[in-house]
C-alpha cells in the first residue's frame, strides 16, 4: 500500500477515467501530483460505461477537446504497454425523418467547419457498413471515420500507469473527507488517513462531485440518473470492425463487444437516482436492471436489429451516471475558491471526453487560464438557480429525456420555469410575450399579435415568429420600441483604487471623467477576449458594470481574480436591484422627454454618457448606449419603480407607435449593425485585433493592461484570422451559425453567429476568415465567397463594414 504523503502540489480526488487523465496530464507537465481514490480506480461510473467515443459537438472547443481524447487513445497503448481496447472503427448515425436528415446535414457541415471528417451516406451505404440492420425506414446516414470505442476500465488503468511513469502518486482506499480553505484559497485536503497540504485540489468525483464540492462551499450542479444498456451473447455477423451506431429516431445506440452487441438508449422519461443521497459504499456496484423501463427502448431497437430478437442476453446493465442541466460537463476553477478545480458531470460521454478533458484541465491549472474556448463546459456558466438541487434535477431530467431529440435552432427548455422574473413579467405576459429562459430569468423573445399564440413552433426553416419579429425590428428602426433587459448582470466596482484596478483589467480606456460610459473587453494573457461589457464611471471611486445575463458568474470571477492584490477595489453584484428598460428608436428622445424634466438633447446628454435622471417621477440611471444601432437609452431603474416607468413609457409612446420588442428582434438588429456577441463571435480564442475591435483598445496610450503584451506582439506580425460579415441573397437560405466559409473554393472558417436582418432583407452571418500566411483587408476583399449550409454551397458576399448605419448617424443624432 502506498503511504499518504504529507503534501503535493496538486491533489486529484477521484480515480475514474477523468481523475486518472487529469493526473496523467499534470504529471506529464512536470507537476507533483497525488491522486486519492476512496476505493479502487475506475470503480465509480467508469467501469460500467459502454465505451463509445464520439467527437462531434455543436461547439468548436468541445469538439477539439474530444479530438484530443481520440489522439491520446490512439497512442496510449503503445505509450504505456497496457491494452486499452481502443479501436477507431468509426461512428455511424442514422436519420429516419426529413427534419432529422436536415439536422444530420447541418451536423456534417458543422463537422467540416471544425475540420472533422463526416460523410453523408445513403441508407444502402450505411447498411453495407452495418449489415445487421434493417434500413427500410432510414432516409439517410452519416459516418465519422475517426470515432471509435474503448474499454473504459483498461483505458483508466493505462492512464494511471502513464501518470505514475511521470511521477504521480496514487493512493487507493483513501477517502477525502474535507478540503482546507483559508482566505478563499485551497490549502489542503483531509482524508481518513491524514491531511495533505496542497496548492490545488481537483474534484473528479463523478456523481459524488456535488456532495464533495459542498465540503468546500463549491457548487457542482449535477444529479445522478439511471442509464441502461443490454449486452448480448455473440451474434452471427457481428464483427470487430462494426462501427458504433447511433439511431436517434429510435433513441438507441450500439457497439460491438466480444462478438455480441451492446445496445443502450435514452428514454424520454428517465429515472433519477439517489435523490436522498448516494448510499455509502456504492462502488463497483450496479442497480437492478429495470426491464419494464427498458422495454420502450427494446421495442424501438428490435425492428432496427431483428437479430436482437433471438440473441442471448448476457446482462442488462443499469448504472447511475452524473448528468447536468444543460447536457454538458463541468470544467474549470470553481468561482467560490481559488485553486479548487472541477472536472465532473460527464453526461454519459465521460469516456469520450476523459482524455481531452484531463488535458484541458491540466493546461488550465498550469497556465492559469483555459487553454482555448471552453465556455460551453466552463463551471462559471452556472449561477444562483443552479444552487438548488431540485431545480437542477428537473432541468437535467428534461435534457436527458431529449438526448436524442432533434436539437432545433432557437429551442428553449420547458422545465423548472418560471423562476426569475423581472417586475415587468406580468405586464409583458399580458402583452402576449413568448418568453425564453437564461440563467433562470424569463425574457421576452417575441410578442404575438392578437390571434396568434405566443408559442414557438420549431423547424429548420423560417419559424413561426419570423414575421412578428420583423414587425418589432421595424418598430425599432422606424419608431420606438421597449425591451425588458432586466436580466443583464450588473456590478458595482467601488473603492479608492477602483479606477486603477479596472484600468489594468480593461483593454479600453475606462479611467475617464465621471459620467462617461466605455465599451470594453477584458483580455487574458494571450490577448483573447474573456469579457465584453459596458463600464460606466459614476464618480471618482464608483463604476457601474453591465454584462450579459449568462455571464454573471464568469465575469464577476474574472474581475475578482484579476484585480491586482493589495488594491482597494471591490465588486458588488447588484443585478437584482435594478430592472433595465431599454427605449430604442428614432422617437426614443421624444418619448422620454415627455416623461422627464431632464435635458436629453444630444448636446446635453451625448452618446456614451451616463446620467441620473427622473422618468415619470422615478430615479433612473440612464445609459446612452445601444446594442440595436439606434438612438436610445438603457434605463436602469430600481425594481420598485420599474412597473411605473414601463407603464408611463407605453402611455407616452402611444403617439409614436411604441411597441414591445424581444430578444429575437435584438439579435436581428445587432447582426445588421455588426455588434459582436461574447461566447460566439468573441471568445478567449480571439483578440480584439482579430475581432475588428482594435478601436476599443488603449494601445495608443502607454497605460499597461492585462493582455497588452500579446496584442503588441500580434500587431507587429501579419494576422492569421479576421472577423468579417457575410450575406446571402438567396431568400430560401436560413443561416443559424456554424456554416462553413469558403474563399475561392477553400475552407477558411465558419460562422460564429448568424440570422436574418429585416432592414437589409437578407440572411447575415459573421465569422473569422483564417489564413496561416497572413491576412489583410485586400486579401479579404479579393476573394470569392461561398457558405456551406447543410452540405450545400451558396454564394455569399463578404462585408468589412457594418451593413447598417456604418457612419453611426442614427445613434449619435
Ligand atoms: C450505463 C452507462 C453507460 C455509459 N456509456 C458511455 C459511453 O458509451 N461512452 C462514454 O463516453 N461514456 C459513457 N458513460 C459515461 C461514463 O461512464 C462516465 O461519464 C465516466 O466514467 C465518468 O468518469 P469520472 O471519472 O468523472 O467519474 P467516476 O468514474 O464515477 O469516478 C469518480 C471517482 O471518484 C471517487 N470518489 C468520490 N468521492 C470521493 C472522495 N470523497 N474521496 C476519494 N474518492 C472519491 C469515486 O469512488 C469514483 O471512483 C456511461 C455511463 C453509464 C452509467
Image (spheres, helix red, strand yellow):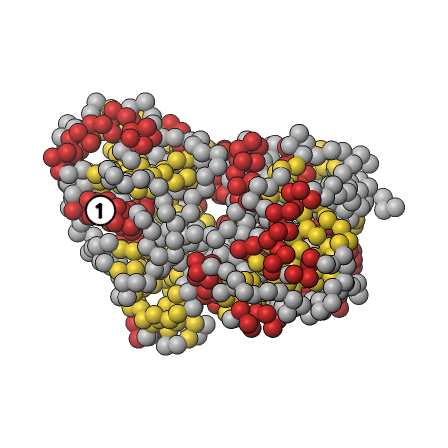
| Among the 4 quarters of the image, the one containing residue 79 | bottom right
Q: Is residue 215 above or below residue 749?
A: above
Q: Position of residue 512 (x, y in %)?
A: 31, 42
Residue farthest to the bottom, as pictured: 744
Measuring 31% from the left and 40% from the top, which residue is drawn there? 453
Q: Position of residue 812 (x, y in %)?
A: 18, 47
| Among the 4 quarters of the image, the one containing residue 164 | bottom right
Q: Is residue 2 left or right of residue 282?
A: right
Residue farthest to the right, as pictured: 1
Figure label count: 1
Residue matched to label 1: 471
Residue nearest the viewer, comparing 426 with 653: 426
Residue nearest the viewer, comparing 240 with 758: 240
Measuring 25% from the left and 39% from the top, which residue is drawn there? 451
Q: Is residue 678 left or right of residue 590?
A: right
Q: Position of residue 749 (x, y in %)?
A: 42, 66
Measuring 28% from the left and 26% from the top, which residue is drawn there? 643
The answer to whether residue 626 of the structure is visible from this angle is yes
* Disc 1 secondary structure class: helix
Q: Is residue 514 above or below residue 40?
A: above
Q: Position of residue 761 (x, y in %)?
A: 23, 58
Amino acid at each position: 500500500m502506498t503511504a499518504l504523503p504529507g503534501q503535493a502540489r496538486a491533489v486529484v480526488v477521484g480515480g475514474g477515467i477523468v481523475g486518472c487523465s487529469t493526473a496523467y496530464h499534470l504529471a506529464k507537465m512536470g507537476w507533483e501530483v497525488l491522486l486519492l481514490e476512496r476505493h479502487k480506480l475506475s470503480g465509480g461510473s467508469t467501469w460500467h460505461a459502454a465505451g463509445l467515443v464520439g467527437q462531434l459537438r455543436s461547439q468548436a472547443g468541445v469538439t477539439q477537446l474530444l479530438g484530443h481524447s481520440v489522439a491520446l487513445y490512439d497512442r496510449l497503448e503503445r505509450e504505456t504497454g497496457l491494452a486499452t481496447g481502443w479501436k477507431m472503427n468509426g461512428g455511424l448515425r442514422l436519420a429516419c425523418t426529413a427534419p432529422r436528415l436536415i439536422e444530420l446535414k447541418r451536423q456534417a457541415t458543422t463537422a467540416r467547419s471544425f475540420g472533422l471528417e463526416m460523410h453523408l451516406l445513403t441508407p444502402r451505404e450505411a447498411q453495407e457498413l452495418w449489415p445487421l440492420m434493417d434500413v427500410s425506414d432510414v432516409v439517410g446516414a452519416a459516418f465519422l471515420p475517426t470515432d471509435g470505442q474503448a474499454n473504459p476500465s483498461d483505458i483508466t488503468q493505462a492512464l494511471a500507469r502513464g501518470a505514475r511513469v511521470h511521477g504521480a502518486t496514487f493512493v487507493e482506499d483513501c477517502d477525502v473527507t474535507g478540503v482546507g480553505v483559508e482566505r478563499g484559497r485551497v490549502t489542503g485536503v483531509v482524508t481518513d488517513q491524514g491531511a495533505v497540504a496542497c496548492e490545488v485540489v481537483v474534484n473528479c468525483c463523478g456523481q459524488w462531485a456535488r456532495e464533495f464540492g459542498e465540503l468546500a462551499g463549491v457548487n457542482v450542479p449535477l444529479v445522478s440518473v439511471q442509464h441502461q444498456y443490454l449486452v448480448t451473447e455473440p451474434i452471427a455477423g457481428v464483427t470487430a470492425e462494426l462501427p458504433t451506431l447511433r439511431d436517434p429516431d429510435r433513441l438507441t445506440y450500439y457497439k460491438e463487444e466480444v462478438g455480441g452487441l451492446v445496445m443502450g438508449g435514452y428514454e424520454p422519461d428517465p429515472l433519477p437516482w439517489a435523490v436522498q443521497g448516494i448510499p455509502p459504499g456504492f462502488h463497483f456496484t450496479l442497480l437492478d436492471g429495470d426491464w419494464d423501463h427498458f422495454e420502450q427502448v427494446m421495442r424501438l431497437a428490435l425492428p432496427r436489429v431483428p437479430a436482437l430478437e433471438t440473441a442471448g442476453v448476457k446482462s442488462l446493465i443499469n448504472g447511475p451516471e452524473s448528468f447536468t442541466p444543460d447536457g454538458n460537463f463541468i470544467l474549470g476553477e470553481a468561482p467560490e475558491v481559488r485553486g479548487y478545480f472541477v472536472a465532473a458531470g460527464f453526461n454519459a460521454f465521460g469516456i469520450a471526453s476523459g482524455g481531452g478533458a484531463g488535458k484541458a484541465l491540466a493546461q488550465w491549472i498550469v497556465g492559469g487560464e483555459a487553454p482555448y474556448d471552453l465556455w460551453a463546459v466552463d463551471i462559471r456558466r452556472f449561477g444562483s438557480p443552479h444552487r438548488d438541487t431540485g431545480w437542477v434535477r428537473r432541468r437535467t431530467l428534461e435534457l436527458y429525456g431529449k438526448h436524442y431529440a432533434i436539437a432545433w435552432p432557437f429551442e428553449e427548455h420547458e422545465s423548472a420555469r418560471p423562476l426569475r422574473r423581472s417586475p415587468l413579467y406580468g405586464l409583458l405576459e399580458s402583452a402576449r410575450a413568448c418568453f425564453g429562459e437564461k440563467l433562470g430569468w424569463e425574457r421576452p423573445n417575441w410578442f404575438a399579435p392578437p390571434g396568434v399564440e405566443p408559442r414557438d413552433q420549431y423547424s429548420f426553416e423560417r419559424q413561426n415568429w419570423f414575421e412578428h419579429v420583423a414587425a418589432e425590428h421595424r418598430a425599432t428602426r422606424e419608431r420606438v420600441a421597449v425591451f425588458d433587459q432586466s436580466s443583464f448582470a450588473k456590478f458595482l466596482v467601488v473603492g479608492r483604487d477602483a479606477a486603477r484596478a479596472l484600468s489594468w483589467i480593461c483593454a479600453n480606456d475606462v479611467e475617464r471623467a465621471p459620467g462617461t460610459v466605455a465599451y470594453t473587453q477584458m483580455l487574458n494573457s494571450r490577448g483573447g477576449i474573456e469579457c465584453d461589457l459596458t463600464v460606466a464611471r459614476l464618480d471618482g471611486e464608483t463604476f457601474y458594470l453591465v454584462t450579459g445575463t449568462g455571464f454573471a458568474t464568469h465575469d464577476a470571477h474574472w474581475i475578482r481574480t484579476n484585480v491586482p492584490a493589495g488594491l482597494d477595489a471591490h465588486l458588488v453584484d447588484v443585478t437584482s436591484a435594478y430592472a433595465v428598460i431599454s427605449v430604442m428608436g428614432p422617437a426614443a428622445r421624444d418619448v422620454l422627454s415627455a416623461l422627464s424634466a431632464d435635458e436629453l438633447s444630444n448636446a446635453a446628454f451625448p452618446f456614451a454618457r451616463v446620467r441620473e435622471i427622473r422618468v415619470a417621477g422615478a430615479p433612473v440611471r440612464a445609459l446612452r448606449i445601444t446594442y440595436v444601432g439606434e438612438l436610445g437609452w438603457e434605463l436602469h431603474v430600481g425594481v420598485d419603480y420599474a412597473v411605473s416607468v414601463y407603464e408611463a413609457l407605453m402611455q407616452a409612446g402611444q403617439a409614436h407607435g411604441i411597441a414591445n420588442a424581444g430578444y429575437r428582434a435584438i439579435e436581428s438588429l445587432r447582426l445588421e449593425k455588426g455588434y459582436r456577441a461574447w461566447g460566439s463571435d468573441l471568445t478567449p480564442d480571439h483578440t480584439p485585433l482579430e475581432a475588428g475591435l482594435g478601436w476599443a483598445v488603449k494601445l495608443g496610450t502607454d497605460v499597461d493592461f492585462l493582455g497588452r503584451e500579446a496584442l503588441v506582439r500580434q500587431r507587429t506580425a501579419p494576422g492569421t484570422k479576421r472577423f468579417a460579415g457575410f450575406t446571402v441573397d438567396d431568400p430560401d437560405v436560413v443561416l443559424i451559425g456554424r456554416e462553413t466559409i469558403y474563399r475561392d473554393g477553400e475552407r477558411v472558417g465558419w460562422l460564429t453567429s448568424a440570422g436574418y436582418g429585416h432592414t437589409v432583407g437578407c440572411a447575415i452571418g459573421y465569422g473569422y476568415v483564417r489564413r496561416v500566411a497572413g491576412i489583410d483587408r485586400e486579401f479579404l476583399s479579393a476573394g470569392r465567397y461561398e457558405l456551406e449550409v447543410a452540405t450545400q454551397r451558396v454564394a455569399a458576399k463578404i462585408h468589412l463594414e457594418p451593413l447598417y448605419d456604418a457612419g453611426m448617424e442614427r445613434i449619435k443624432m
